[in-house]
Image: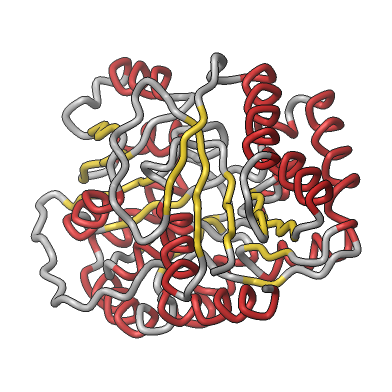
């Protein structure tokens, strides 16, 4: 049985994308190990068809964490047998690249985002130059790569001369009958990291003028600032922070909401060309959503009309757009019906066929 090691920098618990990928690859007959890091808050492993491994680190954030984690990961890979290593994003590509070179094995690159163009990197020029150097050093030398959308695949091919396949980050198809909650007022749901550029400050400000509740599932760099903002605006009765939510509970939570939210500032090409998994989670749960008028979301809206698009994050824009979904029941119902059609197309059961074909041809 061929062994494939997938590497990430998170603690594995909440990584739905990698849980799907590793499950599919392992069920296709490969010996799969998913490697991440251990945190003080890490939960016990949930049982899957693949193995899981966490590396211990002294540092938990910043440049020292990335240096330490990459060193520990390199030596783990160096002294562990494998046939292929799949590095998820640039922050784990160096250990995968060099360990595979030394052992004459295959290195795969899975670009979940345009790493050098995320806001946290774009706004720090010296850090950006380092990661760009890592990208130029490794990606052009790789021949087995894939990413999450066509826009990023085209950009990577243009910038690095390497062809990228496209495997979208979509959920498993819902097979059980969907029982929608009846909420009054309606519930707007955000799921994901509470990081810079996600439009959360703007959405919280807009909530003062909306007859709805705003549920926020996740934590991140802005957790404290966002809670302080809610308190300062006296919106504690309308904005609910739910903290980290495991994938299973997140699915249940999504079914209880009425509207999905996926707002981004154009603070880098990674956000502009993104295709977030939450957009598909909302579709699968039959939630009309508000997305940015960016290329990939515009493509989905043009095909299936499951969401409304906004060009900016001005309070007036957000209030007007969300009020359409809150107050116009006919429009809301039309989008729900469109979600029922789109959810049959955007399923992991269909997408994993491309993934398995990729690994079967590779090994």
Please state, as top left, top right, bottom left or bottom right, where the N terminus lies in the image: bottom right
Q: Position of residue 54 (x, y in %)?
A: 47, 35
In the displayed structure image, the side of residue 209 where residue 203 appears, left or right: right
**Residue drawn where x is 34% and y is 56% of the image:** 260
Asked if residue 349 is positioned above or below residue 320 in the image, the reply reads below
Give above or below for 325 relative to 227. Answer: below
Identify the coloring.
secondary structure
The front one of 61 and 324 is 61
Q: In this view, does 233 lie to the left or right of 98?
A: left
Quadrant in which residue 116 is drawn:
top right
Q: Residue at x 42, y 51 (%)?
A: 51
Residue 195 place in picture, x, y as percent: 51, 32
In the picture, residue 335 is in which quadrant? bottom left
State the residue in front, 162 or 190: 162
Can the viewer see residue 179? Answer: yes
- Location of residue 356 with respect to 186 vertically, above or below: below
- Whether residue 267 appears in this view of the structure is no
Q: In this view, does 213 lie to the left or right of 298?
A: left
How many numbered circles does the render carry? 0
Query: For this rendering, which residue is in front, 89 or 156?
Result: 89
Residue 345 on image: x %, y %: 42, 83
Looking at the rendered image, the quarter that the C terminus falls into is bottom right
Q: Position of residue 213 (x, y in %)?
A: 21, 42
Residue occupying the point 35% across, 71% down = 172
Residue at image x 46%, y 59%?
277
């Amino acid at each position: 049985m061929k062994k494939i090691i997938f590497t990430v920098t998170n603690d594995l618990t909440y990584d739905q994308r990698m849980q799907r990928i590793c499950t599919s690859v392992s069920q296709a007959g490969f010996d799969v190990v998913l490697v991440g890091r251990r945190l003080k808050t890490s939960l016990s492993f949930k049982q899957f068809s693949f193995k899981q491994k966490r590396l211990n680190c002294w540092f938990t954030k910043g440049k020292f964490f990335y240096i330490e984690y990459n060193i520990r990961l390199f030596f783990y890979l160096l002294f562990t047998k494998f046939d292929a290593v799949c590095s998820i994003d640039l922050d784990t590509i160096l250990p995968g690249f060099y360990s595979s070179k030394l052992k004459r094995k295959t290195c795969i690159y899975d670009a979940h985002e345009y790493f050098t163009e995320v806001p946290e990197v774009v706004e720090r020029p010296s850090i950006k130059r380092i990661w760009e150097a890592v990208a130029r050093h490794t990606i052009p030398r790789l021949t087995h790569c894939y990413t999450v959308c066509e826009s990023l695949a085209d950009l990577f091919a243009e910038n690095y001369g390497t062809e990228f396949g496209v495997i979208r980050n979509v959920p498993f198809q819902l097979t059980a009958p969907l029982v929608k909650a009846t909420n009054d007022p309606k519930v707007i749901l955000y799921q994901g990291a509470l990081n810079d550029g996600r439009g959360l400050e703007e959405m919280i400000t807009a909530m003062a003028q909306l007859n709805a509740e705003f549920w926020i599932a996740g934590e991140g760099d802005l957790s404290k600032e966002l809670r302080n903002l809610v308190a300062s605006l006296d919106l504690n009765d309308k904005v609910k922070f739910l903290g980290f939510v495991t994938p299973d509970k997140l699915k249940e939570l999504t079914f209880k909401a009425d509207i999905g939210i996926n707002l981004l500032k154009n603070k880098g090409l990674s956000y502009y060309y993104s295709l977030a998994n939450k957009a598909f989670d909302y579709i699968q749960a039959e939630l009309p959503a508000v997305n940015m008028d960016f290329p990939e979301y515009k493509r989905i809206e043009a095909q299936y009309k499951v969401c409304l698009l906004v060009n900016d994050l001005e309070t007036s824009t957000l209030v007007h757009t969300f009020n359409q979904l809150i107050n116009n029941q006919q429009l809301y119902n039309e989008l729900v019906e469109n979600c029922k059609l789109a959810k049959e197309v955007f399923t992991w059961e269909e997408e994993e066929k491309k993934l398995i074909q990729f690994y079967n041809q590779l090994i």
